[in-house]
Image: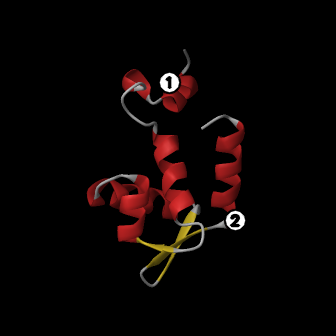
Amino acid sequence: MNLFQFYLSGGCDSISRRSRTAISVDILRAALEGAKKTHIVYRANLNFDVVNRYLYLLKEKGLIEQNGNLYITTEKGREFQNIARELGM
């Protein structure tokens, strides 16, 4: 298994844990039409610490943007979701 496959599978605990990609897709899906952080936490079934880390990374990569207290999935984030869906995630 190469590093890319390991990353997509979620590492060693892929049965009991979601992959980083799956978590990112869940967050982007929650923010498609704009969502507050609390909404993202509940929709993605995560805690605030994890959501904060992912929001920072997703903003840095241009997949999500913040407008006041709303987070909105960008066009690039929608494309990422479509690719992930095609891969079965």
When the figure is inspected, residue 34 is found, relative to residue 85, above or below; the finding is below
Instruction: Report the disc number at residue 77.
Output: none
**Which residue corresponds to the image point at 50% horizontal and 52% vertical from the top-left?**
26
Give left or right: position of 71 versus 47.
right
Secondary structure under tag 1 reads helix
Q: Position of residue 52 (x, y in %)?
A: 34, 61
Residue farthest along the bottom direction in this orientation:
68
- Circle 2 residues within 10 Å: few <14, some 14–19, many ≥20: few
The amino acid at mark 1 is Phe
Q: Earlier in the sequence, mark 1 or mark 2?
A: 1
Q: Position of residue 79 (x, y in %)?
A: 71, 54
Please identify the quadrant where the N terminus is shown. Answer: top right
Please identify the quadrant where the C terminus is shown. Answer: top right
Residue farthest along the top direction in this orientation:
1
Q: Position of residue 15 (x, y in %)?
A: 41, 24
Q: Which residue is mark 2?
A: 75
The Cα atoms of the two marked residues, 1 and 2, are separated by 27 Å
Q: Nearer the viewer, residue 73 or 62?
A: 73
The amino acid at mark 2 is Glu
Q: Which residue is mark 1?
A: 6
**Which residue corresponds to the image point at 45% horizontal and 30% vertical from the top-left?**
10
Give left or right: position of 45 versus 82.
left
